[in-house]
Amino acid sequence: MSVLFAEKSWPQIKEYIDQNALVILPFGTLEEHGLHLPVNVDAVIAEQVAIRVAEAVQERYPTLVMPVAWAGYSIRKMNKWPGVISIRSEILVEAWFDILASLVKMGFKKLLCINGHGQNPEMIKLAARRISDEFDVHVVTSNSWGLAAETMKQIRKSEMGGCYHGGEYETSLMLYFTDLVDMRKATNEDIMKYRSDFYPGDMFGSATGGTFLSTWYVQESRTGVYGDPTEATKETGRLLVEGMVRNYAKLIDEYMNLK
Ligand SMILES: [Zn+2]
């Protein structure tokens, strides 16, 4: 059965509400990802992971997936490359609050955000906190790569600095989900070289709490990549998806059983 919210009629949506269904909201953006990837990487990853997670849990919990939020926020420096659509962060907080609030007002109480874009989390969390404060409905926010971390640590081929924007992680997932990757154009020249105790230079490095510094300001990129896509494979993508679905299913079990 389709898990897509947008394809349901209102009486069908009402049935989901009556069953206290889970709604998964994928968040991406349109942003350059180097020479070898299309600009929709973050949107594709968030949406495809959301659909697979929903399909995996829908027998236990009725689940719907919202259309992906295809435009997010990108820092100004990204405009060096064509293909970037950026909405101002304060507008996104308002818009995403309204989307979540619409779902809450129609009766949904279990909402899970799956984000695929590194510059979205702050806005998603702000919108989610406001939902808690105003409606006493508690939204789970997550980044897809966070739930892929344990798998990626076991199977990665690139060295530290290889998994960031357009690197091994995202390229592997795009190889698995689409036929839009041109591996002939993938290079490792823009692997992250800067690394310190405070700044891991890799999505799967160990950061010190929430220490943050934008990749784009510590190293210039020629291709638009930060990482090493040359080590990416479709098989890595498949294993990552398996690991993510497994972890999201556990997270959902926990969330759906909280009062
Ligand atoms: Zn990305």
Image (spheres, helix red, strand yellow):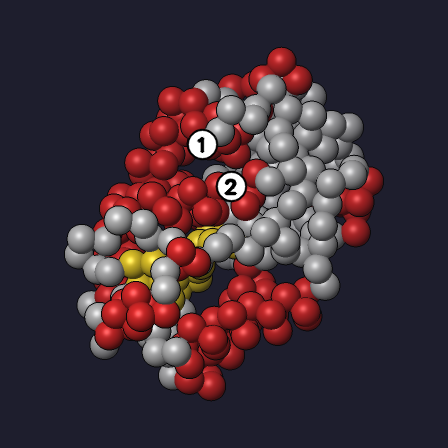
Q: Are marks 2 and 1 in contact (CB under 8 Å)?
A: yes
| Residue type marked 1 | Phe
Q: Identify the secondary structure beneath mark 1.
A: helix
Residue highlighted by disc 2: 44
Q: Residue at image x 63%, y 54%?
A: 71
Question: Compared with residue 198, is residue 192 higher up or lower down, i.e. above or below?
Answer: above
Q: Quadrant of the rendered structure where residue 65 is?
A: bottom left
* Residue 111 picture location, percent across and down: 38, 66
How many numbered discs? 2
The numbered mark at residue 177 is 1
The numbered mark at residue 220 is none
* Residue 229 picture location, percent across and down: 57, 24
Question: Compared with residue 237, is residue 54 higher up or lower down, i.e. above or below?
Answer: below
Q: Identify the secondary structure beneath mark 2.
A: helix
Which residue ends up furthest to the right in the rendered image? 80
Nearer the observer, 227 or 177: 177
Q: Quadrant of the rendered structure where residue 167 is?
A: top right
* Residue 35 picture location, percent across and down: 69, 25
Nearer the observer, 197 or 82: 82
Question: Compared with residue 168, is residue 21 higher up or lower down, i.e. above or below?
Answer: below
